[in-house]
Amino acid sequence: MLRLEKRPSPSRFWQGATPVLAVVLTMIAGGLMFAALGKNPVEAIRTIFWDPLFHPQFASYSRPQLLVKAGPLILIAIGLSLGFRAGIWNIGAEGQYIMGALFGAGVGLAFYPADHWFIFPLMVIAGALGGWIWAMIPAILKTKFNTNEILVSLLMVYIAQNFLSSMSLGLLRNPQGGGFPGSRNLSQYPAASNPELFAGTGMHWGVIAALMAVIAAYILLQRHILGFHIKLAGQAPRAARYAGVNPTGLVLLCMGISGALAGLAGLFEVAGPAGQISIGFNVGYGFTAIIVAFLGRLNPIGILLAGLLMALTYIGGELAQFMLGLPAAAIQAFQGMLLFFLLAVDLLSNYRIRLGYKKEAI
Amino acid sequence: MKRTTLLATAALGLGMAFGGAASAQGMDKVKACFVYVGPIGDLGWTYQHHQGALEVVETYGDKVEIAFQENVPEGADAERVLTQMALSGCNIIFTTSFGYMDPTNTVAAKFPDIKFEHSTGYKREHPNVSTYNARFYEGRAIQGHIAGKMTKTNKIGYIGSFPIPEVVMGINSYYLHAKKVNPDVQLSVVWAFTWFDPAKEADAAKALIDQGVDVIAAHTDSTAPLAEAAKTNGAVIGFGQASDMADFKPSPRVSSIIDNWAPYYVKRVGQLLDGTYEQVDSWAGIPEGEVEIGEITDAVPAEVKAEAEAMRDAIEAGTYHPFTGPINKQDGSVWLADGDVASDGDLLGMTFFIEGITGDIPQ
């Protein structure tokens, strides 16, 4: 018989190995699903994981696209991971992402068609501010009235979405858009656009910001007293209090950082790859980033790799759809499997699997 | 000497052969790719485009290969999908929603040898971009006639997707022909701001039914509005949109507009195969078979059915244009004088309601 035995402390080996194991298990289960759909599973897995990187025809285009897709995921996930480590659950990054985009694009469009060097920097600040404000609402409600930040931040997403629709139809609508909702295209307004910095690399300011966030978070957690407080608050809240950690301050700080980073991600996206505010602007980066944060074990380097992996499944998934005719739903199921297996095998880092019955302790 | 001449003649011949080939060269095999905004199982807009794609395979067999992608958002992701399709060796790419207009033109600039066909848009910024659309307003005229005759509450409804000329044109045609046969008719428009979202479409239908509307036309892609109408035990009727939606016969679905893209897709891929392909701006309707009127069921009285079919036949024969004056704009100013017929340019840029419609186009 199989039996679980709790480890005295989490296994370091399994903490590193479980994400890899989860990916392998996803490939096996996903392969079975693809086979059941009548597709060659090896070819499907190769199309998803190998072709975007090494296919002679696509790779030169899809490799940079990985950065474009992974950039916002990593930026948001880094912010979320700080809170998650401290036991502060910001689930509303999607809403903060939308608000960052609206604030940033709003500032940019207010200057249209003027051309000043300071417009884009101002938009960056506005973007961060928009996300920060949206995150402060659940944060202050939690610290003042002890509300649950999971529910409040999640519900704020729906408010942000309605705000986005109303802005696309009203205030920010392109007056020359022929009646179609959506703002002017910022990529055609150089002073406010976030272009590809080096042709063919996919690098834009959002990707650079994501890499900077990874480094900053790494230093914060490894070297700074604040990083120690964050970790302590998550692992032993009472001990943290004795050590002088101010829980209210920590909530405001963690929610604020994650909101501002999500807002930045939204701004860089709206000024860059998306180009405009539109009703369907948000495509779920804020929610996917939660998966990325856990897939990366809340570790900055892990999040960097997890963001790239997630981007790979998106871009590879698209390739698999039209190269092999796999349905869109099968790709979504495949991505879902990844999170499922990750959570499932997480068990191994905290428990040992033993054979045989345990003797009753007397 | 003789030899040089021979060589020169051969070279000239070769040159002519190749030169000629460049302008009118057919292809042995065409890979046609389709970008869809919804799932192919939506039983409406995307479903009909996919039926057209399948018809291409049926017609040309081994000479064509198709590839498609469903649920492509109208934004940053569309550009990537299009680029990847272009890189994968598609020879012609059909983008089947209005929101793909800018991405289609952007990507077309990078791949001048690949043909791009954008449905329902108006931008052809490069020689390899064509646009195609169907004259759905012709079908809306027939629906309006049926709606005006059938309504008992004198309230008819329209679920608008986005306030773009394409949709505004449909609303105007629907109202105009309802009003002609029923001067008391009132039109309510609900904007759903989506092409495909069954939950939102159902909410829009509910809102209309709550206002007392008993005939609903929809400009969205799913069967949800008909499903809502079906819950009223025959009190509310509607129309199949984009596809026949025959499951809801004989009521609430009393007729339908069927988008038949197959003739266009078959023609364009055929032209690519035989080398006669050229850039076009295509706008076909009932006469060309691109817009079909689905069976008018027995839920409609025989005389109304006969009138509706007569209107369809007149449009098909080219003797009747749904927008024939006198027609005033909503503000009372004259749009078309008596006997004038709307120009295509006027229709494609239509951003106003006609006289009698209450409510505003969202600004």
Image (tube, coloured by chain):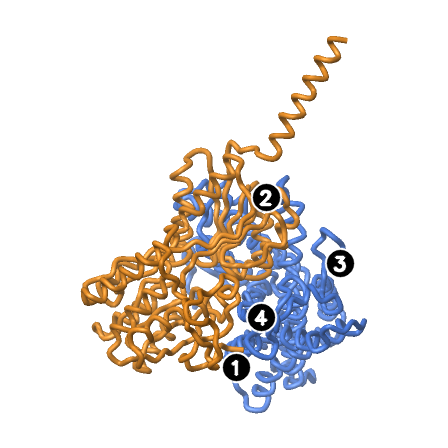
Specify the chain shown as blue: A
Residue, disc 4: A182
* Residue B282 circle label: none
**SS at mark 4 in the image:** loop
Specify the chain shown as orange: B
Picture residue at 39% right of the left edge, 70% below the top: B201
Q: Are marks 2 and 3 in contact (CB under 8 Å)?
A: no
Above or below, comparing residue B359 to residue B132 in the picture: below
Q: Is residue B232 visible?
A: yes
Query: Disc 2 residue type?
Result: Ile
**Label 1, label 3: how far apart the Cα atoms are:** 38 Å
Picture residue at 64% right of the left edge, 80% below the top: A239
Above or below, comparing residue B228 to residue A322 in the picture: below
Picture residue at 60% right of the left edge, 50% below the top: B83
* Residue B114 circle label: 2
Q: Using residue A147 as the reference point, say whether residue B139 is left or right of it.
A: left
Instruction: Tell me which chain the residue with mark 1 is part of.
Output: A
